[in-house]
Image (cartoon, grey):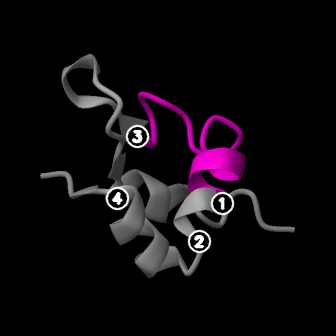
Amino acid sequence: MQTYLTTDELATKIHYDPRTIRTRLKDAVLLEGVHYIRPFGGRKLLFIWETIQRDIGTFSS
């Protein structure tokens, strides 16, 4: 079972501003089809929490 989060819900969990997630992390670190989906081909983003949680340390120095 996967947990889907909106941008605002993800921002609360990882302590980032929602705008930062949308403009800097999306498509640079968070990849479509891996870390997030666009349900029904729409504009809304749903982030896959388990995948983000697994990969969150991968990009750390």
> How many residues crowd mark 1 within 10 Å: few (<14), some (14–19), many (20+)?
few
Q: Is residue 27 left or right of residue 12?
A: right
Residue under circle 1? 20
Q: Amino acid at mark 1?
A: Thr
Which is closer to the viewer, label 4 or label 1?
A: 1
Q: Position of residue 6 (x, y in %)?
A: 31, 57
Quarter the C terminus occupies: bottom right
Q: CA distance from mark 2 to mark 4?
A: 20 Å
Q: Which mark is residue 43?
A: none
Q: Quadrant of residue 19?
A: bottom right
Please determine whether, in this image, residue 49 is positioned above or below residue 28.
below
Mark with earlier residue (4, 3): 3
Q: CA distance from mark 2 to mark 1?
A: 5 Å
Amino acid carrying mark 2 in the image: Asp
Judging by the rendered image, the residue that carries numbered circle 4 is 50
Residue 36 tag number: 3
As displayed, is residue 14 above or below residue 51? below
State yes or no: residue 24 in magenta: yes
Q: Main secondary structure of the magenta part?
A: loop
Asked if 17 appears above or below 21 in the picture, the reply is below
Q: How far from the left and from the top, in percent, is residue 46?
A: 31, 45
Q: Bin the neighbour count of mark 4 within 10 Å (Cα to Cα): few under 14, some 14-19, many 20 and up.
A: some
Labels 2 and 1 touching (C-beta < 8 A): yes
Quick one: label 2 or label 4, which is nearer the N terminus? 2
Give the distance between the C-alpha atoms of the residues marked 4 and 1, in whole angstroms: 20 Å
Tell me which label, 3 or 2, sits earlier in the chain. Answer: 2
Q: Which mark is residue 17?
A: 2
Displayed quadrant of residue 7: bottom left
The magenta span reads 20-35
